[in-house]
Image (cartoon, rainbow, N blue to C red):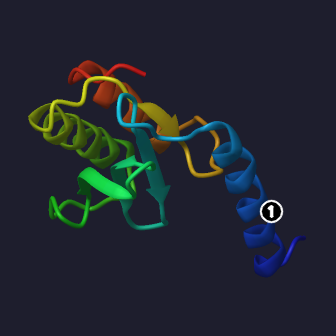
Amino acid sequence: MASKGHKMMLLERRKKRVRKRVLGAPERPRLSVYRSVKHIYAQIIDDSTGRTLASASSVALKIPGGNIESAKAVGRAVAERAREQNVAKVCLDRGGRLYHGRVKALADAAREAGLEF
């Protein structure tokens, strides 16, 4: 079985591989998703200026974040905050994780709330 250090190294390698291709621009910022065991976080980032345009998390929404329902709530919240900043199109940075489960639920909820991927 792989050790925790080895797993984290592989995750970092996948993150870098994804970030080579996904770059947030002013017309199409990056929707970065971070998933921990207990919570889920999402930020919309303009990489040209290094600014975070909108963010949401299960911690900020005061909901338990280890399930799909909380990921959907975070996706809706980040999409609403992005629309307030006049952001309609984003590119998804899944943070080295599979597009599956909580990451997919967050992305689908953000799409339903009005973001284009």
Residue farthest front in this picture: 49
Q: Residue at x 78, y 59 (%)?
A: 13
57 and 16: which one is in front?
16
Task: Provide the residue designation for mark 1.
Answer: 10
Q: Is residue 28 left or right of residue 52?
A: right
Can residue 104 be seen here?
Answer: no
Is residue 92 in sight in this rendering?
yes
Query: The C terminus lies in which quarter of the figure?
Result: top left
Q: Amino acid at mark 1?
A: Leu
Q: Residue furthest left?
A: 84
The answer to whether residue 4 is left or right of residue 102 is right
Q: Is residue 63 left or right of residue 40?
A: left
The tally of labels here is 1
Image quarter for residue 2? bottom right
Residue at image position (26%, 46%) is 74
| Closer to the camera in the image, 1 or 90 | 90
Q: Nearer the viewer, residue 12 or 36?
A: 12
Percent of width and height locating residue 65: 33, 59
- Pick the front one: 53 or 81: 53
Q: Residue at x 55, y 44 (%)?
A: 94
* Residue 65 vertical placement versus 19 (above, below): below
Q: Quadrant of residue 114?
A: top left
Residue 49, percent from left and from top: 38, 54
Identify the secondary structure beneath mark 1: helix
Percent across and percent down for residue 101 are: 51, 39
96 displayed left or right of 112:
right
Q: Is residue 8 above or below residue 55?
A: below
Location of residue 17 in the rendering, given as x and y in whole percent from the top left corner = 75, 48
Residue at 58% over, 51% down: 95
Binning the other alpha carbons within 10 Å of mark 1 as few (below 14), some (14 to 19) or many (20 upward) gives: few
Quarter of the figure that contains the N terminus: bottom right
